[in-house]
Amino acid sequence: MTIKPLIILPDPVLRQVSKPIERVDADLQRLSDDMLETMYDAPGIGLAAIQIGIARRMLVIDLSKEGEDKQPLVFINPEIVSSSDDRSVYEEGCLSIPDYYAEVERPAKVTVKYLDREGKEQSVEADGLLATCLQHEIDHLNGVLFIDHISRLKREMVIKKFTKASKSKAL
């Protein structure tokens, strides 16, 4: 397993729409292992393939707490098929926007259809943190960041801060 470098805002790669995965094979399973390893190392609770520069519709999630057994989840070609009218608010962060957090309102419950690590069709009804995390990571696959759900003023300040930081690193 290999820890991959994370793509950080303002990199335009984060705005790419990821392509569907045609085939679940050993290479894809290796990629999911690398993604989990990268996510655990960061540390985070979710990671979309685009965040390591791979524009494929795959994400990994693990909501286990420190000291608990790991519970890795792999979602290939995930698609939200229904969402509740009820809303919930969570303070979200993102491995591609380090050390920035903001409250985001999203549907409280979602149903997601996807392929698992073996390529079998699955469906999950999620609420709470899992629902939020799935929506956050599926947004990544569509080129959407959590800061797109906050006020324009706050979003512009965050983008400006990360753009400035990336320019100073380039010097």
Image: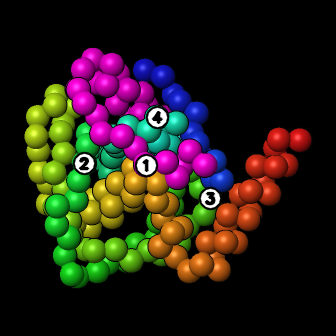
Label 4 is placed on what type of residue? Answer: Ile
* Quadrant of res 132: bottom left
Give me the residue at 25% from left, 48% from top: 78
Q: Is residue 50 visible?
A: yes
Q: Nearer the viewer, mark 1 or mark 4?
A: 1
Q: Which residue is mark 4?
A: 54
Identify the secondary structure beneath mark 2.
strand
Which mark is first along the chain, 4 or 1? 1
The answer to whether one can see residue 40 in this image is no
Which region of the structure is painted magenta? Answer: 12-38
First in residue order: circle 3 vs circle 1: 1
Q: Is residue 158 above or below residue 72?
A: below
Residue 17 numbered mark, or none: 1
Which of marks 1 and 2 precedes in the sequence?
Answer: 1
Q: Which residue is mark 3?
A: 99
Question: Could you tell me the amino acid type at mark 1?
Answer: Val
